[in-house]
């Protein structure tokens, strides 16, 4: 009984797609956060340059 349950659990791949989608979403989120931080510092430097030249 336990062996058949274990083999069924090992063959079951129903949750695999959800995990893959979650990993892809996490990678996209990390990339977005890194890009936004870089963009924020660029915008802050631009505003500082404009403020200093005024």
Image (cartoon, grey):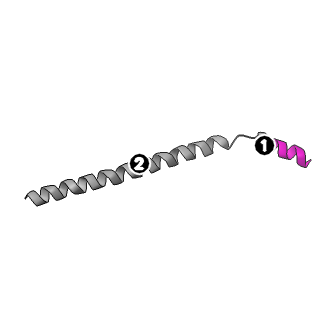
Kindly give the residue lying farthest to the left in the view shown.
54
User: Residue 39's x, y, as percent?
Assistant: 30, 50
Sequence-first tag of 1 and 2: 1
| Quadrant including the C terminus | bottom left
Within the magenta stretch, is there residue 7?
Answer: yes
* Tags 1 and 2 touching, CB below 8 Å: no
Q: CA distance from mark 1 to mark 2?
A: 35 Å
User: Residue 20's x, y, as percent?
Assistant: 60, 42
Q: 10 Å neighbourhood of mark 2: few (<14), some, or many (≥20)?
A: few
Q: Who's the residue at 78% across and 39% down the image?
A: 11
The residue pinned by badge 2 equals 32
Q: 10 Å neighbourhood of mark 1: few (<14), some, or many (≥20)?
A: few
Q: Secondary structure at mark 1?
A: helix
The residue pinned by badge 1 equals 10
Q: Who's the residue at 89% across and 49% down the image?
A: 2
> Looking at the rendering, which quadrant does residue 40 occupy?
bottom left
Picture mark count: 2
> Looking at the rendering, which quadrant does residue 16 occupy?
top right
Magenta segment boundaries in residue numbering: 1-10
Q: Who's the residue at 56% across and 47% down the image?
A: 22
User: Residue 29's x, y, as percent?
Assistant: 46, 49
On screen, residue 16 versus residue 12, left or right, reads: left
Kindly give the residue lying farthest to the right in the view shown.
1
């Amino acid at each position: 009984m336990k062996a058949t349950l274990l083999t069924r659990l090992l063959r079951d791949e129903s949750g695999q797609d959800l995990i893959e989608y979650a990993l892809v979403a996490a990678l996209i989120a990390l990339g977005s956060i890194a890009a936004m931080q870089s963009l924020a510092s660029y915008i802050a430097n631009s505003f500082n340059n404009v403020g200093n030249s005024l």
